[in-house]
Amino acid sequence: MAAVAVGEFSKPRQSAAQANRVVNLYSARHYDTDTAIYDSFTKKTGIKVNLIEADADKLIERIKSEGANSPADVLITVDAGRLWRAQDAGILQPISSKVLMSAIPANLREPSGYWFGLSKRARVIVYNKDRVKPSKLSTYEDLADSQWKRRLISRTSNHVYNQSLTGAVLAANGASTTESWARGLVDNFAHPPKGNDTAQIKEVAAGVADVTFVNTYYVARLIKSKKPEEQEVARKIGVFFPNQRDRGAHINISGAAVAKSAPNRGAAIRFIEHLVSREAQEIFAKSNNEYPVLAGVPLDSAVAGFGKFREDSLNAATYGRNNTVALQIMDRAGWI
Ligand SMILES: [Fe+2]
């Protein structure tokens, strides 16, 4: 912990010798266990990690307003939609790294090197086991069918996870089919969208609705919870990987990028390379129940329990770039 400083800092006036002895990290991941990864980087390299944690959109705004004076070296966010926003805002620089290219599958990194996936999550259908036979489930598209009327719930369209899912549906099906799909979902909502992914799972377990879509690590968190009421929630629901007969389940990432004005560019690249090392990937997998991007790293047992599945191999940059149009479609469809 000692190596990680949290809080305010300004762009250091530093000599060439001082450069790359620190890395200034702006992170939107709020997982305490990530500090173990930063500490191991400091131990290995002697490079200190200065950490600022905030909401992704705030961090992007902050780097933008700091401009050329920004001390930011590395930006970490969850969801490719946000990484795309940062790229689009002109606050990132492309990098090339053989280590990153070989560790991270091509669809999980931005093709020009603007950002790199560190961990994966699938957006799956969660269903109430007493009320839904898994044989009735098939695809994201099918949840727009009238058989799910008043049986589906969702978080709002404000949230980037559903924007990315819609961006992936858009890439697969085109704009007009995606808008009909979004309208169909809205018609099927048991109540207007509200709450986070965990709230959706709890409502499905309670029978408020029968189906929803959430990221896998939220389910794993409930399975591993010490609270009996959360364990009960986990027992009542099932995880279904959609679109297994066609493109596969939607995969999103948390990812990292080098900031455009990074004062410690070399240290920033080494830091991101560390995040895809086997050691760091094991921590991502175990502590936050994510799927590692590096092949051969074991899954957490709760995550492994979901079973093997087909992943949509769509490049994260494609649904990232689709974010704006996806949100317009959701708005027009009345997905609040
Ligand atoms: Fe999340």
Image (cartoon, rainbow, N blue to C red):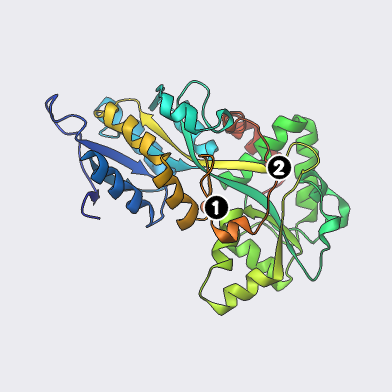
Which residue ends up furthest to the bottom in the rendered image? 228
Tell me the residue at 79%/46% (across/down): 139
**Total marks placed:** 2
**Amino acid type of the residue tagged 2 in the rendering:** Arg
Image mark for residue 311: none
Relative to 51, 104 lies left or right: right
Q: Is residue 82 above or below residue 96?
A: below
Tell me the residue at 39%/23% (across/down): 95
Could one spot residue 85 in this view of the protein? no
Q: Is residue 292 above or below residue 209?
A: above
Q: Quadrant of the N terminus?
A: bottom left
Tell me the residue at 16%/34% (across/down): 12
Residue carrying label 1: 299
Q: Nearer the viewer, residue 140 or 98?
A: 98
Residue carrying label 2: 310
**Amino acid type of the residue tagged 1 in the rendering:** Leu
Which residue ends up furthest to the right in the rendered image? 147
Measured as percent of width and height from the top left, residue 201 is found at: 64, 63
Q: Is mark 1 within 8 Å of ligand 1?
A: no
In space, the residues marked 2 and 1 are separated at their CA atoms by 16 Å
